[in-house]
Image (cartoon, rainbow, N blue to C red):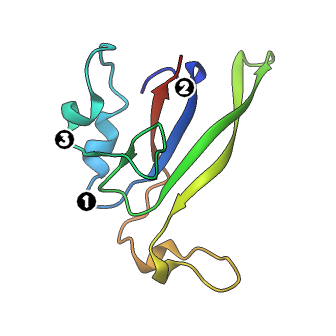
Amino acid sequence: MRNILATVFYTLNHINEDIYKKAHQTSGRYDANVSEFEAVGLTPEFKSDFQAPFVKESTIQLGIALREKIDITINNTIMVIGEIVQLYIPKDCLHEDGFVDIEKQIRLLVPVWIVTTKQCG
């Protein structure tokens, strides 16, 4: 994963049964000039002029704009706060009250997301 703190836009892409092994490989170390998409066999997908790629094989995709970074000194981490500016979800997973039923579409639920970023500037 590229340095998310050097980006303005990023995506969260839900991992399903068909891509979980490839998605796990995105956590490996890659040189800056290596495409993680190519390295693991996933497909980048650009939508609606959003600057960071989504994972085409993912059925739930969030496009996020970075809004704030907060240093947390107690454990030497940084909290990243983003605004969801694009959301792609299958229609049959969205209820009238806004509840997202991911079990309708996705066979295996994995508490992991693929994060993609776009270096800006």
Question: Considering only vertical position in the picture, is 106 above or below 110?
Answer: below
- Residue drawn where x is 45% and y is 51% of the image: 13
- Residue drawn where x is 67% and y is 77% of the image: 98
- Residue drawn where x is 18% and y is 41% of the image: 41
Residue for badge 2: 4
Report crowding for label 1: few under 14, some 14 to 19, many 20 or more residues within 10 A (C-alpha). Answer: few
Q: Earlier in the sequence, mark 2 or mark 1?
A: 2
Residue for badge 1: 18
Percent across and percent down for residue 57 are 29, 56
Report crowding for label 2: few under 14, some 14 to 19, many 20 or more residues within 10 A (C-alpha). Answer: some
Percent across and percent down for residue 94 are 56, 79
In the image, which disc is placed on residue 99? none
Left or right: 77 as drawn, with respect to 121: right
Task: Pick the residue in front: 72 or 80.
Answer: 80
Percent across and percent down for residue 90 are 44, 74
Percent across and percent down for residue 67 are 73, 34
